[in-house]
Amino acid sequence: MVHGCYRETSSQKTAVQRVPAGVAAGHPATAEVGLRVLEAGGTAADAGVAAMLASCVAESLLTGLAGGGFASYYEVATGATTCLDFFCAVPGLDAGRRAAPMIPISVAFGGVPQRYEIGESSVGVPGVPAGCAAIHRRWGRLPWQRLVEPAMGLARSGTLLPQPHAHTLAALAPAMLPGFGAQVYAPGGKLLEGGDLLHHPGLDVALGILAEEGPAAFYTGRVGQVMVDLVQAGGGVLTHADLAAYRVLRPPVVAAPLAGASVLARSDLNDFIPTVASLPADLPSLSRGERAVALAGALRAFGTQRVGDTTNISVVDAAGNACVITLTLGLGSGVWLPGLGVHLNSMLGEGELIRPGTLPGERMASCMCPTVVVSRAAALVMAIGSAGATRIRTALLQTLVNVLVEGDDMRTAIRRPRFHVVSDVVHAEAGYGGEELDALAAAGYTVQQWDRLDHYFGGVSAVGSAGAAGDPRRGGIGRPLQSR
C-alpha cells in the first residue's frame, strides 16, 4: 500500500479520453441538484456540496445536517487524490459531565435484528456543515449561497419518497418515529409509502441560517446553542467546547492495484484497501468460480460486521475533476432541533465505532470509504462510493471487479447480483451465478440464497469511463451531464 497523497507524475500522463461529466446519487433529487450546479459552471466540489445538502433533505432517512462523513477529491491538473474526514467526534471535552443511559431499540435488516441505542446521550459532534465548507473552500468556484439554495427549495417543497426508501423507513421506524419524527415520517399516524411526499417543517429555516451565516452557526452560533441546550437537557454530554473544537481532518490516502488500475481511498474500519490488495494478481485470468472464491476469501479475511445506513454521491465535472462524498446520520437519535427540522445523529449508539482509548474530541471509526480509481497513465477511471456500513466494502469490491475485470458498463456492474460474506456463510442475492455458488460451496462456504436484490447489500453510486449509475437497491440514479 502507498501512503500519503497519491500523485501521478506529468510524464505518466497520456492522451486518454476524459471521463464524461455526471452525477450519481441515492435519490433523483440529489442527482438533479448536482447536475444543475455543474450546468452553472460549478466544479465537482461545488456539485458535490450542493448534492450533499440536497441529500440532507431528500435522503433524511440516511443522512442529515447533524451527521458526518468523508470525501475523496481527484484533481485532474495534478493527478492528486485527497481525502477529507468530517465524521462525527466523541463529545465530552468539558470534564465532569456524565451521560444519562441511552434508549435501546432493535432494528431488523434482512430479517436480522440489530441492537442500537438512541436518545440525547447518543449524539456525537456533527461534521456535515464543516465538511461542506472545507470541500467548497478548497475546490469550489461558485458562491456558497448558490450551493445551499437548491436544498432550501427542496426543504420548502418536499421530495417524493422512492419505494426503496419507503422499505428502509419501515425497518428504521423505531429510530425515525420518536418525537418530531412522527410528524415527518408518519403524518396523520400513517407511515409514508413509496411516492408519498417527504417534508421536514423548519428544515428550510436551518438551511437558510447555513446559507447566510455559514457553518459557524452550527458550531459557535445560534444553531449550536440550540443543539447543546437540547442534548444536555436530555442527559447528553455534548458541550459548546466540543462544537468549537471541531475541525475537518485530512487522513492519508492509501492505494492498492486492481486489474491494471490503482484504487485510492482512506484507511477505513473495514479495511477496504487491504482487501483489494489481498486479491490475487491473476484475478482477471481466473474462472468465474475461482474469482468468486478469491473475492470471498479476501472479504472473510478482513473487516467487521454491522448493519447501518449511509448515502453516497459521486461527481465528475467537465474538466475531469472528481468528488466522492459518503455521509451518514447513524440511525438518527430521535432528537430533533425545535423549529429547524434537523434530526441529530446517533453515532454514540453504535458502540463498535468508538475504539478503545478514543478520547473526547477524537474521531469515531467508520466503514465509509469514498474511492477514486485511476489508470497507470494518471487518467481518472472511476469515482465511486457506497452506502451500507460493513457491506460498503463488499459492494465496492464487486462493482470494481465487474467494471475493471468483467468489462461491464456502470449500470450493469451496479445492478449485478452480489454476495456478502459473514464468517463461513455467503449471503447471495437472487440471480447470482450458479457456477460461482457451486465453487463457493465446494470451497466450504454455506450459501444462503436470497430471493431478491436487497437494500442490505449496499448502495453504490459511481461515475466513470463506464458511465454513471446509482443503485436500484436504494433508489439511486446516475445522470451524465451531456444527456441534458
Image (spheres, rainbow, N blue to C red):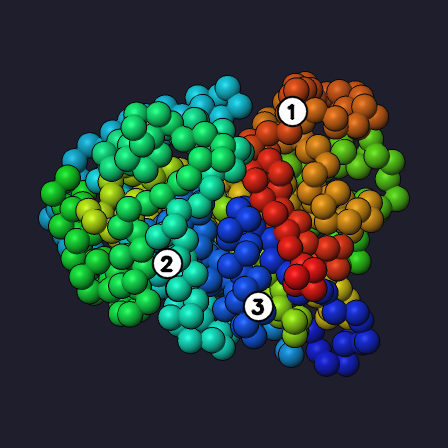
Whether tag 1 and tag 2 are in contact, CB under 8 A, the answer is no
Instruction: Name the one closer to the observer, 470 or 58.
Output: 58
Badge 2 local density, few (<14 within 10 Å), some, or many (20+)?
A: many
Dot placed on the residue nearer the N-terminal end, 1 or 2: 2
Q: Mark 3 points at which residue?
A: 38
Amino acid of disc 2: Met
Badge 3 local density, few (<14 within 10 Å), some, or many (20+)?
A: many
In the rendered structure, find residue 152 and report the number of the disc placed on it: 2
Amino acid of disc 3: Leu
| Residue 303: % across, % down | 55, 39
| Residue 21: % across, % down | 66, 65
Spatial distance from mark 1 to mark 2, Cα to Cα?
36 Å
Spatial distance from mark 3 to mark 1, Cα to Cα?
35 Å
For the point 86% across and 39% down, the residue is 286
Tag 3 secondary structure: helix
For the point 72% across and 81% down, the residue is 10
The picture quadrant where one finds residue 39 is bottom right
For the point 40% across and 72% down, the residue is 144
Instruction: Name the one closer to the observer, 480 or 71.
Output: 480
In the rendered structure, find residue 452 and report the number of the disc placed on it: 1
Spatial distance from mark 2 to mark 3, Cα to Cα?
18 Å
Count the labels in the image: 3
The reply, left or right, for residue 444 in relation to residue 85 is right
Amino acid of disc 1: Arg
The reply, left or right, for residue 74 in relation to residue 361 is right
In this orientation, does residue 349 appear? Answer: no
Badge 1 local density, few (<14 within 10 Å), some, or many (20+)?
A: few
Tag 1 secondary structure: loop
